[in-house]
Image: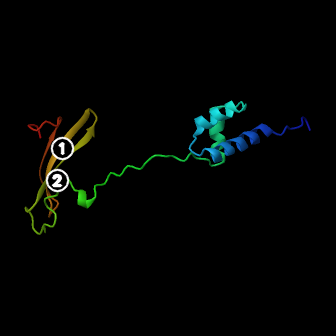
Amino acid sequence: MYYKPRTNNTKQAIKNHSTQVFEQIPIYGEKKVHQQLLEDGFKVSLNTVAHYRQELDLKAVLAVKQVNTTIPINKAHKKYSYKLQGLNISHANHVWSTDITYIKIAGGMVYMAAIIDWHSKAVLSHRISNTTLPQNL
């Protein structure tokens, strides 16, 4: 054999220590674990720590509260309540709605405003403009 391969004990030591840090403080991410390893005397880069944590499938436990974006039925908006609740839309031209959407084109954006019949889902009228000013739509 040309040379005798060396066993890399530092790699395993870093992985073991990284696992210990994770078990003690599971909210630590890669940067804080890297800082902890440096303080404990290991010479290792942030990318190496990230790679080892990925190999070991160690992911920080995030202490972030989930944001609820839905509005419960009993807390419906008082000023803009849903006026059509319980209405039976049984024929055309009974209920209309408007919609404004943007369309990307080579020169930028154009905006389309449409009036839609709810029963037939037909577009009754539409207008396209390069601005969202009311007089243009």
Q: Amino acid at mark 1?
A: Met
Farthest residue, direction right: 1
The quarter of the picture where the C terminus appears is: top left
Which colour scheme appears in the figure?
Answer: rainbow
Labelled disc at residue 112: 1
Residue under circle 2?
A: 78
> Which residue shows up at 32% across the image and 51% down it?
69
> Is residue 109 rendered to the left or right of residue 16?
left
Q: Nearer the viewer, residue 12 or 39?
A: 39
Name above or below for residue 83 compared with residue 14: below
Q: CA distance from mark 1 to mark 2?
A: 30 Å
Q: Position of residue 18 (x, y in %)?
A: 68, 42
> Which residue shows up at 71% across the image and 41% down it?
17
Q: Are marks 1 and 2 in contact (CB under 8 Å)?
A: no
Q: Which image quarter: residue 136?
A: top left
Q: Position of residue 87 (x, y in %)?
A: 13, 66
